[in-house]
Image (cartoon, rainbow, N blue to C red):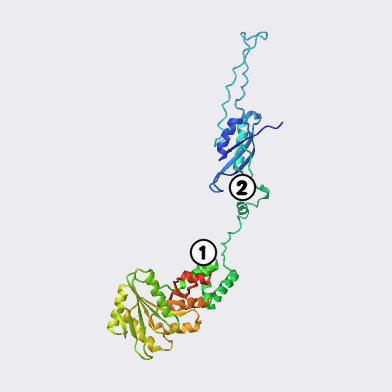
Amino acid sequence: MSTPTRTYRGRAVDELIPRIQRELGSEAIIVRRREGLTGGILGFFQHPFVELEAMPGSPRIDIYDEEHSAVPPAPPPPPSRPSALAPRPSQAPPPPPPPPPPAAPPPPFFTREPPPRPAHGSAYVTAHLAALARAERPQFVPRPPASQRPRESADFGVDFQEMIPREQLPPPPGSARREHASAPPLQPERRTVAPGSHARARAGVERSLRRLGISEELAGELIDAATAHTLPLAPRLGLAQAVRSVLVQRIPVAPALPSKGAAIVLVGAGGAGKTTTCAALLGAYRTGSTLPASCATLLRPSERGELELILSPQIMKPTPASAPRALRALRSARAGGLAVVDTPGLSPVDRTSIRELARLLGALKPERVVIALPATLGTTAAAQLLEALKPLGANALAVTHAEETDQIGVVVELACMFGLAPEYMLDRSRSRAGGWRLTRIDPTGLAAKLLP
């Protein structure tokens, strides 16, 4: 008939041993030990536990040598000379000597220094549990979700983790370290990124940029900057997102316009859409802005004539744009609200007209000089136009005819090359009424168009 066992559970072996001794006696035997984690929420904030399974033991008899006996034997009585008063053999023997004093009680269950003669039961339990306490803790597999974990018996009401047999586990790192203690210490491994590790992602990003008009040189430069400076600090970002963030940093941004008044001048070649952009900008400000908006038009009556200005309602007849009256009217319109100035078409080869307009803008000092750049222009023609218009001191771009092509990368690359901020985009509205639609663009939106 097997002896029933009892299970005890707590946080450490030290707090379970007194309870085992108190309930099962000092002869208790530990038959099994388990450890694990319990409690917490969804596998977090768990705390360890120790489970001991014990059974009552039978009293044990210790056999000690005579020299280790607690009570030394009484020495034999010394021989005495016969006396007349000595009792005769027929008389009764003398009474036996008094019994020895009782042995001292056993020492406490846990002592730092073992007593010279421990009690037989507590010595067995203490040595057995001390060996368990010094044993190496078992390894555990990761805790599965609560819905997949089996329930243990109702005595405990908790889920225990599956234990892996010790013989199936790889050797712990400490044992290998002890075996090879005499070997020289290993140098820390230096990890380097292989040149072809991002080859597939690099080819995909470069293909996307080239398809939308970015040159091969700029695409390679953006990818190199992303892999060199962005991905080391954000490895989970991905190459496409890293290149997008680098491109956002490269695209120029124009300074903010003052809230009490400003002047915006639209310049560009003939047929670029600058007059349409000027009208759309003026309509947007008159519809939704708190600033009063006025439109000034610079025109050239003849091929070699002087620039003239019309500003309603201040100047209704064409007046030389360089005249003091015209400059005062422009400054007054800018101080009281927003002045939108439309200019005549300029040719990259007409250096005289470009210099004349540059002198006028230098006297007016507008907050924004915007070049209307069609998205349908090629890289070479657009670069020639922007190079010729450098004397005007432009600081922003208005992308026109955007609905006719998807080569937005050409405009983005030229903006980075010449330091011009892409600020407006003009395209035809998709509504039934048709017409033109002017929207504000920013570097983040342009980068998203190039790398969606």
Q: Which residue is found at the position 57% from the left and 42% from the top?
A: 49
User: At which x and y percent is residue 22?
Assistant: 58, 30
306 above or below 169? below
User: At which x and y percent is residue 107?
Assistant: 56, 31
**Residue at the disc numbered 1:** 234
Residue 186 seen: yes
SS for dot 2: helix
Q: Does 211 sit left or right of 392 as displayed?
A: right
Q: Which residue is found at the position 52% from the left and 75% from the top?
A: 221
**Residue at the disc numbered 2:** 147
Q: Does 273 sit left or right of 142 as displayed?
A: left
94 above or below 398? above
SS for dot 1: loop
Disc 1 residue type (three-letter): Ala
Q: Are marks 2 and 1 in contact (CB under 8 Å)?
A: no
Disc 2 residue type (three-letter): Ser
Q: Split into 4 quadrants, where in the image is the N terminus?
A: top right
Residue 424, numbered circle: none
Label 2 to label 1, Cα distance in Å? 35 Å
Residue 285, located in which quarter of the rendered image?
bottom left
User: At which x and y percent is residue 373?
Assistant: 45, 80
